[in-house]
Amino acid sequence: MKLLIVAVGQRVPDWAQTAYDDYAKRFPPELRVELRAVKTEPRGSRTTETLMAAERERIQAVLPRGCRVVVLDERGTALTTQALARQLTQWQLGGDDVALIIGGPDGLEPAFRDAAHQRIRLSDLTLPHAMVRVLLIEQLYRAWSINANHPYHRE
């Protein structure tokens, strides 16, 4: 199984990329993690709807066929770390690759967001996109460590 993190926005600070890379290399071979950054649509004088539609097209272009689409959304289901670990197990048992989508500055197009298999939220706080990448991969690694009885997670 592969976890694909699709993030709108290509530039992140060095500290965020270093942290992301550190967690990404910790995953075992049977649970690969891949990041695909897609370009943010230039703002200009376009409407928000037009911007989000263009970003949706870019997101859909990098999604593998048949993958489970999980969007990060402030209105999504809140998960504890333990619940995320259980969810990760379910995804693995399902066998399909899972794409976790981080939207752009304006969020995700409502129709795309609503059509996703799942909507989850990482926090009640508004977080910078670079921080979301790091927080997401750390929590996925923590979820894996719980399921693998690895000592990374201590209760």
Image: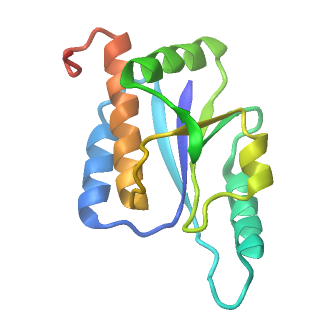
The vertical placement of 15 against 71, above or below, is below
Image-based side of 107 in relation to 111, left or right: left
Q: Quadrant of the N terminus?
A: top right
The answer to whether one can see residue 30 in this image is no
Residue 85 pos. (x, y %) = 43, 18
Image-based side of 155 in relation to 119, left or right: left
Total labels: the figure holds 0
The vertical placement of 126 against 98, above or below, is below
Residue 154 pos. (x, y %) = 19, 17
The vertical placement of 28 against 3, above or below, is above
Q: Quadrant of the C terminus?
A: top left
Image-based side of 75 in relation to 55, left or right: left
Q: Give whichever of 99, 29 is nearer the camera.
A: 99
The vertical placement of 104 against 80, above or below, is below
Q: Residue at x 59, y 44 (%)?
A: 75
Q: Residue at x 60, y 67 (%)?
A: 106
Report the residue that reaches farthest toward the bottom.
45
**Among the 4 quarters of the image, the one containing residue 83:** top left
**Among the 4 quarters of the image, the one containing residue 98:** top right
Q: Residue at x 62, y 83 (%)?
A: 43
The answer to whether one can see residue 89 in this image is yes
Residue 115 pos. (x, y %) = 79, 41
Q: Residue at x 29, y 31 (%)?
A: 26
Q: How is the image coloured?
A: rainbow
Residue 51 pos. (x, y %) = 71, 73
Q: Give whichever of 27, 100 is nearer the camera.
A: 100
